Each structure stands twice: as structure tokens, then as C-alpha cells.
Image (cartoon, helix red, strand yellow):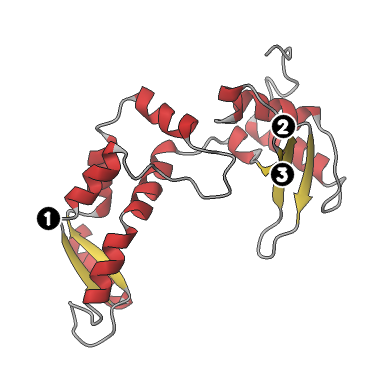
């Protein structure tokens, strides 16, 4: 793909954000429009689109209660799909995304534990609301899992994810680090706790 030097090259993050926001103010919700600036930005900087050599040719803002708007691009051969221009300026934190996906992957284990302990195991007075990873903490297990991946393997996780799906980012159930963190939960110390006890437990560990 050869699109020439993009207009945004050389602009600071603040300046680029301001220019895009000013451009978006010109259009109403659901009004379709074209923007070479945003199209070039996504083609050059979006973690998936840049890898696949694709870019949207039209855009629109969709109203969503509780948020400023959902931003969508029209991709030839695919149609309308949500795409973040902000993540092109301030890229996602890959490790945070993977950690979140790992937390989602162990949710059935956590939910099952909580259902077996309906009363707070710490104070024995209130219903349990959360499951505390007492030892090791979830972040410790997640970091151990991620440390097993090379940069190439991390890149592959994002490139191979079905970005066209409406489902949130996730890891394949058979992925090695999903297996690792699920196996780690077999020996981890978990504790079903109420909200106050969850806060108290975390404070004690980090004191």
C-alpha cells in the first residue's frame, strides 16, 4: 500500500487530537462523511488495520447513552465497523488487554468458587460479593503467563484476533497462557469476600 506521506506526520498527539475533534464537530450523529486525515491515521497507526493494509473510506458517529459517541468506519468488503481513532494516537497497552482477557478466561472458575461460598469467608457476616486472589494475586499469575510470550507471540495474539467480530477482545480457550492461568488457579488461595473485606484484605497485603 502506497498512500504517500500522511498529513498527520509531524503533529503532536495534542495537536492531532484537537484537529480531529474539530473536524468531528462539523457532523451530526449518523451523518456519513469522508476524512483523509482520519483514514490515513487508521491506515498507518491502527494495530489491526495497519497490519492488514486496510482503511475505512467513510465515517459516522453513532449516539450511545452514557458516552460521547461510538465511532464507526465503512470498510470496503466489510461494511460498517467500530474503530478507534484515539487508539491510533495513544496506542492500547497490550499487556493490559491481555490481562483483561486472562481475567475473562478464568471468570468461570471464579464464579464457581463464589457460588460455593455465598457468605464472606473473612468476616462470616455478609454475603460474598467478590473473589479475592489472596495468594498469588491475579496480577502475579497474569504476569507469569505473559512472561512466557515472546514479542512475536504477543503480536500474533492481536493480529489473529477476529477484529471484525462484535465480541470483545479475547484469547482462544486453547492458548497456552489461558491453560497456564487456569492451571495456576488449581493451587491458588482464593477467598470469597464482601466489599469491605475485599478492600481490607488488599490493604493488608500491600501495607
Q: State the image quarter where residue 203 is shown.
A: bottom left
**Nearest to viewer (mark 2 / mark 3):** 2
Element type where label 2 sits in the image: loop
Q: State the image quarter where residue 98 is shown.
A: top left
Of the numbered discs 3 and 1, the one sitting upstream in the chain is: 3
Is there a contact, CB below 8 Å, between mark 1 and mark 2? no
Q: State the image quarter where residue 18 is shown.
A: top right
Q: Is residue 57 above or below residue 21?
A: above
Name the residue tied to disc 2. 77
Identify the residue at image location x=36%, y=46%: 99
Element type where label 3 sits in the image: strand
Q: Position of residue 148 (x, y in %)?
A: 24, 32
Separation of marks 1 and 2 at Cα, in angstroms? 48 Å
Of the numbered discs 2 and 3, the one sitting upstream in the chain is: 3
Name the residue tied to disc 3. 72
Q: Is residue 68 above or below residue 178?
A: below
Q: Position of residue 125 (x, y in %)?
A: 22, 88
Q: Is residue 88 above or below residue 194?
A: above
Of the numbered discs 1 and 2, the one sitting upstream in the chain is: 2
**Nearest to viewer (mark 1 / mark 2):** 2
Identify the residue at image location x=25%, y=65%: 132
Q: Is residue 59 left or right of residue 155?
A: right
Q: Is residue 119 left or right of residue 31?
A: left
Query: Dot 1: few (<14), some (14–19), or many (≥20) neighbours within 10 Å?
Result: few
Q: Residue furthest bottom?
A: 125
Name the residue tied to disc 1. 187
Identify the residue at image location x=47%, y=31%: 160
Element type where label 1 sits in the image: loop
Q: Is residue 194 left or right of residue 1?
A: left
Separation of marks 3 and 1 at Cα, in angstroms? 44 Å
Separation of marks 2 and 3 at Cα, in angstroms? 15 Å
Amino acid at each position: 500500500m502506497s498512500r504517500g506521506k500522511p498529513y498527520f506526520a509531524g503533529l503532536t498527539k495534542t495537536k492531532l487530537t484537537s484537529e480531529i475533534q474539530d473536524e468531528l464537530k462539523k457532523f451530526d450523529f449518523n451523518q456519513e462523511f469522508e476524512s483523509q486525515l482520519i483514514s490515513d491515521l487508521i491506515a498507518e497507526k491502527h494495530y489491526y488495520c495497519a497490519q492488514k493494509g486496510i482503511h475505512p473510506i467513510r465515517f459516522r458517529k453513532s449516539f450511545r447513552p452514557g458516552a460521547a459517541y461510538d465511532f464507526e468506519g465503512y470498510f470496503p468488503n466489510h461494511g460498517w465497523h467500530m474503530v478507534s481513532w484515539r487508539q491510533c494516537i495513544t496506542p492500547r497497552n497490550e499487556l493490559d488487554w491481555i490481562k483483561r482477557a486472562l481475567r475473562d478466561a478464568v471468570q468461570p472458575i471464579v464464579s464457581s468458587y463464589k457460588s460455593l461460598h455465598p457468605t464472606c469467608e473473612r468476616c462470616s457476616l455478609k454475603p460474598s460479593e467478590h473473589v479475592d486472589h489472596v495468594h498469588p494475586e491475579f496480577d502475579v499469575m497474569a504476569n507469569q503467563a505473559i512472561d512466557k510470550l515472546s514479542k512475536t507471540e504477543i503480536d500474533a495474539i492481536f493480529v489473529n484476533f477476529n477484529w471484525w467480530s462484535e465480541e470483545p477482545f479475547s484469547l482462544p480457550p486453547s492458548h497456552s497462557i489461558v491453560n497456564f492461568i487456569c492451571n495456576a488457579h488449581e493451587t491458588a488461595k482464593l477467598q470469597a469476600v464482601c466489599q469491605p473485606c475485599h478492600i481490607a484484605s488488599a490493604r493488608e497485603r500491600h501495607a
